[in-house]
Amino acid sequence: MKKSGFTLVELLAVILILSLLMVIAVPSIMAISKKMNERGLDSKIELIEDAAVLYAQNNSNTLKNELGECNSNSEHCECASTDETGASTDCKYVFTITLDELIKEGVYESESDTDDPSVCDVTDPRDKSNCLDCATITVKLDDEYKTANAYFDKDGITTKTVCN
């Protein structure tokens, strides 16, 4: 009489092989997931920087009136060089703005459906408990308002939902 089925040793061998495959696969999958979350954050940051540039260009006259003349003596200006007379050239207005302010100005859309300030408007894809709302974006706008660059401060990503 012949019995059909698997022996205990065969079942243990299959379980061992599957376990080894899991040990190899899980870290790879986790690394891919982390990399995708990083890319998600980078994409959000790029959109936020674009919104800050749009804000700066749309409000350039107001900003110029608020900040005053741009030269090497101004704390809100950054000048790259000086000409032969010693005058500053290639100056850029420099100011910071938070994502929360960009949302209030209507140039960036909140991910949240509520106006509750305790709710995060834009979350960090790497860690959903982190909020991008209070992170600062430094904008550099040229003197003639033709070009602007924005730089998002990743160190400003916190769990805070209400900015100072």
Image: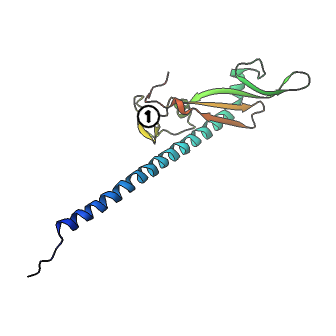
| Pick the front one: 35 or 53 | 35
User: In the depicted view, which residue is nearer to us: 60 or 134?
Assistant: 134
Q: Amino acid at mark 1?
A: Asn
What residue sits right under mark 1 in the picture?
A: 130
Q: Identify the residue at image location x=57%, y=39%.
A: 48
Residue 59 quadrant: top right
**Residue drawn 65% across the image and 31% down it:** 139
At 26% from the left and 61% from the top, the residue drawn is 15
Residue 31, image x, y percentages: 45, 49
Q: Residue furthest left?
A: 1
Residue farthest along the bottom direction in this orientation: 1
Q: Position of residue 40 (x, y in %)?
A: 50, 46
State the SS at label 1: strand
User: In the figure, 84 relative to 23: above or below?
Assistant: above
Neighbours of disc 1 within 10 Å: few (<14), some (14-19), many (20+):
some
Give the image location of residue 11, x and y in percent. Answer: 21, 65
Give the image location of residue 71, x and y in percent.
78, 22
Q: Residue furthest front?
A: 9
Task: Residue at 42%, 28% (x, y): give it.
Answer: 117
In the image: residue 151, left or right of residue 115: right
Assign the N terminus to one quadrant of the image. bottom left
Give above or below for 13 relative to 58.
Answer: below
Instruction: Give the quadrant of residue 143.
Output: top right
